[in-house]
Image (cartoon, grey):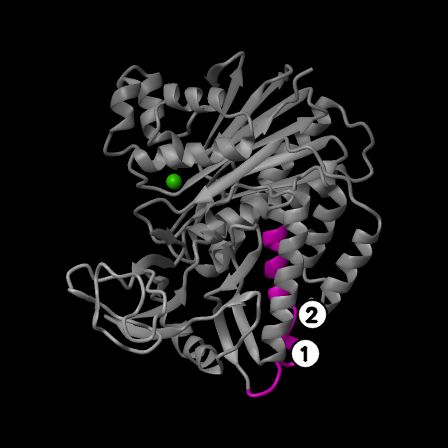
């Protein structure tokens, strides 16, 4: 049904059309003819039962997950596993499936009400699990189902350890940090109070879910306005890869000044996804810090801030890769928008920035790749470059050298302009004409992002796909 980072989901029916009789889950009778809809012995309704089976192959989590299953916990916000089994060295966990969607398939941001519903539900769930001695290894958007009524349900968590008593107090903060990261990425970037609050959670300010929940309630005491949704984003592992090494992020630098980032990491497990995350986090943090106490920055100041933030991301990753002894790196494309007037687009590598103006798509950035250079030198046509065996060789990346050259493009925005940032998993699978058609069809950036990812899947989905779309308001 779906590949997610480190996991595979299957949908299973218990229906066996190859057998002449139906099996009854209530009484165990298997004499009911196929055509009948209720059990001949006990009268139970014999609708097809459906299950979600999640398969994980990280062996470190097997034992704690089985211990979690053995606890047989029950909570309205939890979809508990009804069975676990091993097959061919992987752990399969089975949950009853009532038609819920995966949160993985939701574009960001959610509405304010949805974000708060998710925050409250997840906080309650974490507190419940900790009280019952279950400590999670991580919490990601892959751990949530979305019921048709919009409620979020926790399922199939990554369990780190199971205690006889409650989780010790010293171990109660890490899940709150993971939750903060999820919530911030699903919150509209213009909702700055909420955004800052989740960022604080992400940075570890709350010692427990209880403390987080209490402070969130205080914040909600003054009614937050529903912010306009000007940008949407979505990242997808694709159809072939097991790991999503892409990342994206957004940050409010000052009221009216926003930064949007897409990064495509490389270097494999515990390198690529680390590099891209580090790049996004560093660039957002440094840009915020540099603009602190700078009222009404000039265009030149903003350009310098962007450049410094790129250099900081480069240095952070380079230092980390020396410590780890690997060759991690990342592409980076970022756009800084000031008061819906000025746009700065900066890039390193082959993640791209596009502008849709008056329904026409323009590529803003130039790829720093071998094939792009060969096209510039008229040694390849753009069509040949697309299918070239060395199309993945990059000439510049963030984090691989001591210094990095970045390209910055500066232009005035016009009402109705749309900016699209994306990793090569999108443009490698979808031709520009189709990108243009999709952007011209869907005005809601979240819907457009979903459609772009769908198009990349149709194109083959061979790579991770990340899209971030920013709308400039019409006059
Ligand atoms: Ca890629």
Q: On the image, numbered disc 2 is attached to which residue?
A: 208
Residue under the point 38% across and 29% down: 427
Task: Tell which of 460 and 46 is nearer to you.
Answer: 46
> In terms of secondary structure, where does tag 2 sit?
loop
Pinpoint residue 176: horizontal percent, then vertical percent: 64, 63
Q: How crowded is mark 2: few (under 14 residues within 10 Å), some or many (20 or more)?
A: many
Residue 300, placed above or below residue 175: above
Decide whether the magenta segment is chiefly helix, strand or loop: helix
Is residue 406 shown to the viewer in this render? no
Residue under the point 64% across and 44% down: 187
Q: In this view, does 88 lie to the left or right of 185?
A: left
Is label 1 within 8 A of ligand 1 (CB to nearest ligand atom)?
no
Q: In this view, does 241 lie to the left or right of 400?
A: left
Q: Which mark is residue 169?
A: 1
> In terms of secondary structure, where does tag 1 sit?
helix
Pinpoint residue 307: horizontal percent, then vertical percent: 62, 33
Pinpoint residue 150: horizontal percent, then vertical percent: 57, 50
Q: Cβ–Cβ below 8 Å for labels 2 and 1? A: yes
What is the quadrant of the C terminus in the image? top right
Q: How crowded is mark 1: few (under 14 residues within 10 Å), some or many (20 or more)?
A: few
CA–CA distance between discs 2 and 1? Answer: 8 Å
Stretch of the chain drawn in magenta: 164-183
Residue under the point 51% across and 53% down: 146
Residue under the point 27% across and 71% down: 40
Magenta stretch holds residue 170: yes
Quarter location, residue 203: bottom right
Task: Tell which of 400 and 287 is nearer to you.
Answer: 287
């Amino acid at each position: 049904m779906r590949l997610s980072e480190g996991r595979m989901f299957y949908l299973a029916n218990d229906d066996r059309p190859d057998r002449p009789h139906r099996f009854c889950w209530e009484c165990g009778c298997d004499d009911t003819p196929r055509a009948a809809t209720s059990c001949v012995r006990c009268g139970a309704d014999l609708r097809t039962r459906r299950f979600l089976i999640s398969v994980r192959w990280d062996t470190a989590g097997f034992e704690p997950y089985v211990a979690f299953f053995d606890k047989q916990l029950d909570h309205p916000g939890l979809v508990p596993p009804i069975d676990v089994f091993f097959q061919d060295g992987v752990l399969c966990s089975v949950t009853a499936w009532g038609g819920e969607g995966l949160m993985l398939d939701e574009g960001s941001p959610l509405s304010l009400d949805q974000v708060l519903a998710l925050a409250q539900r997840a906080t309650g769930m974490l507190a419940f699990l900790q009280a019952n001695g279950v400590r999670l290894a991580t919490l990601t958007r892959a751990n949530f189902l979305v019921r048709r009524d919009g409620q979020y349900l926790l399922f199939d968590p990554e369990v780190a350890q199971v205690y006889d008593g409650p989780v010790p107090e010293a171990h109660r903060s890490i899940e709150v940090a993971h939750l903060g990261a999820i919530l911030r990425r699903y919150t509209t970037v213009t909702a700055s109070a909420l955004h800052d609050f989740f960022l604080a959670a992400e940075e570890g300010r709350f010692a427990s879910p209880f403390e987080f929940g209490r402070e969130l309630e205080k914040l909600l005491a003054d009614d937050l306005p529903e912010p306009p949704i000007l940008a949407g984003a979505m990242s997808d592992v694709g159809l072939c890869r097991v790991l999503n090494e892409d990342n994206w992020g957004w940050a409010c630098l000052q009221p009216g000044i926003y930064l949007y980032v897409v990064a495509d990491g490389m270097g494999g497990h515990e390198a690529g996804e680390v590099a891209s995350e580090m790049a996004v986090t560093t660039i957002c943090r440094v840009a915020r810090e540099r603009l602190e106490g700078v009222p009404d920055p000039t265009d030149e100041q903003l350009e310098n801030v962007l450049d410094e933030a790129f250099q900081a991301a480069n240095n952070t990753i380079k230092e980390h890769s020396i410590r780890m002894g690997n060759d991690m790196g990342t592409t980076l494309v970022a756009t800084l928008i000031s008061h819906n007037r000025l746009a700065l687009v900066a890039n390193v590598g082959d993640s791209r920035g596009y502008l849709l103006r008056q329904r026409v798509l323009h590529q803003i950035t130039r790829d720093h790749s071998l094939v792009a250079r060969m096209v510039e030198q008229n040694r390849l046509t753009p069509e040949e470059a697309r299918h070239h065996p060395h199309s993945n060789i990059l000439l510049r990346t963030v984090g691989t050298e001591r210094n990095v050259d970045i390209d910055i493009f500066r232009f005035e925005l016009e009402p109705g302009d749309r900016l699209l940032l994306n990793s090569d998993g999108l443009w490698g699978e979808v031709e520009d004409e189709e990108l243009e058609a999709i952007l011209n069809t869907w005005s809601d950036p979240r819907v457009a992002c979903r459609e772009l990812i769908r198009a990349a899947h149709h194109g083959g989905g061979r790579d991770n796909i990340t899209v971030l779309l920013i709308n400039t308001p019409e006059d």
